[in-house]
Image (cartoon, rainbow, N blue to C red):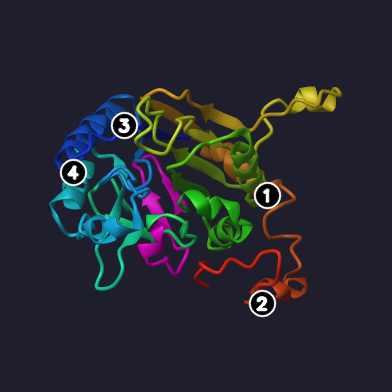
Amino acid sequence: MNDFNVALLQLMPTGTLGGNLAKGIKACEVAKQNGADLALFPEMWSHGYNVLLPENHAKEWKATALDPNGDFVQTFAKLAGKLKMAIAITLLEKTKGQPKNTVIVFDRFGKQILKYSKVHTTESTMENHVAPGTSFDVATLDYGRGKVKIGSMICFDRNFPEAARILMLNGAEIILSPNACELLNLHMCVMKTRAVENHIALFTTNYPLDPNDKYIGNGQSCAFTPIFRNKRKLLAGSKEIDTTIIRMSEDESIGMAPIDLAALRENRAKGGNGNAFRKPRMYAKLLDEKVEPPFVRKWARR
């Protein structure tokens, strides 16, 4: 009864908006049948994260940006209400200025409760034409058997400890992290660390491996908890500890990732990480905007 169940929709894009819409609807229906409380899409599902286009395709790429109030997004709002299941849909969002890399969460009533736009954009790709997000907001999700506080990061955001930390400080218990890149063991280590150091559960949905290499992704959607699952072995002298809830294969599939919220909240109440022992007075340097060698990147927007 304490489990909150997230469906990781590791789907191959179809190449068209209409195809992605239809495939996404079907995947959400399967997720609901499998007992999901929330279905999470990979990054920019609206067009399959096609950001490795040549620079002269920028205008064409921007034209694929969608109005959040348009048919594609609102179809998932209605679907969430119909299925009585939360849906985190991702898209290239149309704005008055540059588009944004966005995830929108609809609750089981079809109400939008969270919209997050990627703060740490990857500016060596077509995301150079994306406006970065400006905040790490947290929302309370009513999933029927209880409530949970959720926030979001997107892909590259995970590489910056500050992103997950701010979400934790804003009250997040769960972080949803749509993804669109290779997930190597290094990335897994980063995500495990984010979960442990912030006492949060982290859920990542990636694209599957494409044998034709058209899209960036190699599956391995995953989820991590801050809870050491085999603590007894650790106490007995074993170095093997695991905080993995699920790590999927490279193939297209839907993975179910449950988190025991009671156990998570006990971990948050008793653990030594999080906020209790932080010393913010020591961290003033984190607010310094100056960048010095060897970290200067001429193309980086600050």
Give me the residue at 38% from left, 24% from top. Answer: 211
Residue bearing the label numbered 4: 17
Foreground of the two, 301 or 190: 301
Query: Can you tell which mark lies on residue 78?
Result: none
> Tag 4's secondary structure?
helix
Q: Is residue 141 above or below residue 33?
A: below
Where does the image place residue 222, in percent across and percent down from the top left? 50, 33
- Which percent across, then down, holds residue 208? 40, 30
**Residue at 65% across, 75% down:** 287
Q: Is residue 229 left or right of residue 168?
A: right
Q: Quadrant of residue 29?
A: top left
- The tag earlier along the polypeptide, 3 or 2, is 3
Where residue 282 sits: x, y (%)? Answer: 78, 72
- Is 128 one of the magenta-colored residues? yes
Density class for disc 1 (Cα within 10 Å; few <14, some 14-19, many ≥20) is some
Residue where numbered disc 1 is placed: 197
Mark 2 burial class by Cα count in 10 Å: few <14, some 14-19, many 20+: few
Q: Which residues are magenta?
A: 127-152
Residue hosting label 2: 288
Kindly identify which residue carries mark 3.
12
Label 2's element? loop
66 sits left or right of 209 in the view = left
CA gap between label 4 and label 2 equals 42 Å
Q: Is residue 41 left or right of residue 192?
A: left
As measured in the structure, the alpha-carbon distance from the residue carrying label 4 to the one carrying label 1 is 38 Å
- Which amino acid type is shown beneath numbered disc 3? Met
